[in-house]
Every structure is written in structure tokens, then in C-alpha cells.
Image (spheres, rainbow, N blue to C red):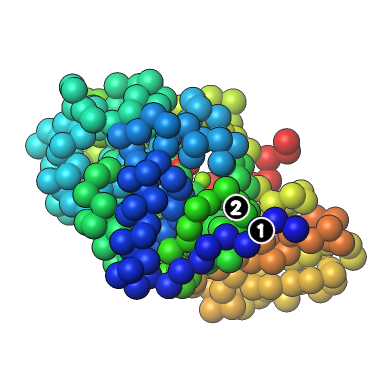
Amino acid sequence: MMPRPDIQPPSSAAVARACDLLRAGDLVAFPTETVYGLGADATSDHAISALFAAKGRPEFNPLIVHVADAAAAAEVASFDARATLLASAFWAGPLTLVVPRLPGSPLSSLVSAGLETVGVRVPGHPVARALLKAVGRPIAAASANRSGGVSPTAPMHVGESLGERVAMILAGGRCPIGIESTVLDASRDRLVLLRPGSVSVGEIESVAGPVEVPDRDPERPQSPGQLSRHYAPSIPVRLNATSVGSDEALLAFGPDGLIRGGVARVNLSPQGDLYEAANNLFAMLRGLDKPGHASIAVMTIPAQGIGIAINDRLRRAATAP
Ligand code: AMP
Ligand code: MG
């Protein structure tokens, strides 16, 4: 069995210890409003290499830099008037802005996979904010799970996935949103959506004008490292199920989640609430990911609002290896 990771409630002593570990180049998992992040000092090549290694993440997949506030963001990246407007409208919150790196930025070039842009975000979760404020330097973080797998929305998911690869887990309960941030490229003439999340295109457009939403061609990732297969359980996932096989597990949605059969079933939201469904998505996929289940059959989820992000994750989870 893997040694148990060090899971700590987020007391001020635990936050101080997390800061010491991060400054020493170690990896610390912490809660954000989206999913648990695996954090590393974004100014240290050594720490960032360790993060890629712990996740088994390909080094061409850039990381998101997390900072305490917009002033700290301006120390690592350059924000034009439009990006500044977006940051003030949506931060702290689940919107990642891809913007040009500041020339002479202290960030390790590994963070942005050698690109001239960097993804930056100010998370809204109180534990993440306390940690970022206390550590006083940018922290690169990816979801605290092995690359390609289901994202962690509770401390024990982090331990199950990473074991002793993480020095410490700051435990802050379940993540309130449960699905990763919206990623918006604000480094070009036109705004481009790179990953749907809980901040919708409509909300962004009401602040900053038209957003281009590229066609989702799985063979042509929009963003470096945006892989067609991701967020995937170890067993196959089948979408838009209207029936369930006797050896399958059912991931239902809504009041009509009454398809009969299957070896196990859970409902993302019996009331048909898409926010509740997003919040349950990863934990329920984990729960159904058992060797005794042939596959996970998922009912249709409406592609509106945060349902667009849910469908994005499910589509990748269902992509064959
Ligand atoms: P993850 O850490 O798995 O939540 O993924 C971060 C997402 O942000 C991935 O889809 C990355 O490709 C994207 N991303 C981060 N930085 C950049 C960047 N500089 N340019 C384009 N996409 C980025
Ligand atoms: Mg991830």
C-alpha cells in the first residue's frame, strides 16, 4: 500500500508549513473553488519539473499560475485594458486568462511550456487565497491527480491518486464548483475560449465583447496540451445512454433518471440542476470506476450554461485511449 499522505485541516500553522514546503520546492495540494490543485513554486524550474513528474503530465501542457490578487498577476504577465477589465469582473473566481508573459518575468519558462503566454488566475477559495497571500509568490497548479485521470474534488481523492508524491494536502472539504476553470485566450486580437467552465461565454461577452468558440475537433487541440482524452476513469465511458447493460454502471441525470438495469447507479442531480451535476461529476465518476463494472453509461446532459463544461469533460472521458 502507498504511504498515507499528510492531510491537514487548514489551520494557520498548516498554512505556514505549506508555505515552507512550497518555498523549499516541494508540492502541496490545496482546495480551490474548482478542483484540488497540486501547487509548486512557479519561479522554480526544479519545483515545476517535480510537479510535471508527480502528475505524469507531458511537459508541453502548460500550467496555470495562481496568484493572490490582480497586483500579483501584473508582476508575472502583461494585462491590456481588455484583460484588466476581465480580471476585475471575474477575479477572484474560476476564469483563467491566457496573457503575454511579462518580459523578465520571474516565472520558470517550464510553467508555460516555453510559450510566450501564460495562464493566470486568482482563485476565490478562502484556503487558496490564504495560502497564496502567505507564500507571497506565484504558485503553478494543476489538478491534484495523475495526468489524464478524474480530477479531485475532495482531499481523499488527492491521496488516492498521488499518494506520497504530494508532501502535504491542505484539506478544505469538497470543492464548491467541482469543475475546472474557464480558460480564455486574451493574448490575441480576438478573445478565444480554450476550455469551457463555470464562467460562461455569455458572461464574458457581456463584459468584454465577442468570444470565439472554436469547433471542437479532437484531432486539433485548441490549446497546447489540451488532450482529446482526459478526465478519464479506468473503465470505458459511454455517452447519451438511453439504456444500460446488465454489467454497466449508470450515471443518470434529472428526474427521468429511471433507466432500468445496470450493476450500480447514481444521479448527478435528480432535480436536473446543472450546477449540482457539475459539483457531483468527478466524485460520481470515481465512485462508479470499479473493476467489476464493464463501463459507465451516462445519460444526456443538456448542453447549456455549465452543462457545456460538463459535456466537454464527459466527451474527453469517453475518448478511447
Ligand atoms: P489543467 O492544469 O489540466 O487544468 O489545464 C490547464 C489548461 O490551461 C490546459 O488546457 C492548458 O492547455 C491551458 N493553458 C495554460 N496555459 C496556457 C497557455 N499559455 N496557452 C494556452 N493554453 C494554456
Ligand atoms: Mg487536470
Instruction: Say left or right for 73 vs 12.
Output: left
Q: Residue at x 37, y 44 (%)?
A: 24
Q: Secondary structure at mark 1?
A: loop
Task: Tell me where residue 25 appears, x and y as whole percent.
Answer: 40, 41
Q: Looking at the figure, which quarter contains the N terminus?
A: bottom right
What type is the residue that disc 1 sits on? Pro
Q: Nearer the viewer, residue 249 or 255?
A: 249
Q: Residue at x 30, y 34 (%)?
A: 43
Name the residue beneath numbered marker 1.
3
Name the residue beneath numbered marker 2.
164
Q: Residue at x 55, y 29 (%)?
A: 58
Task: Tell me whether the residue at label 1 lies in contact with that at label 2, contact meaning CB atoms closer than 8 angstroms.
Answer: yes
Is residue 305 something that shows in the picture?
no
Is residue 6 something that shows in the picture?
yes
Label 2 Cα neighbours within 10 Å, binned few <14 / some 14-19 / many ≥20 = some
Task: Tell me where residue 127 appears, x and y as whole percent.
Answer: 33, 65
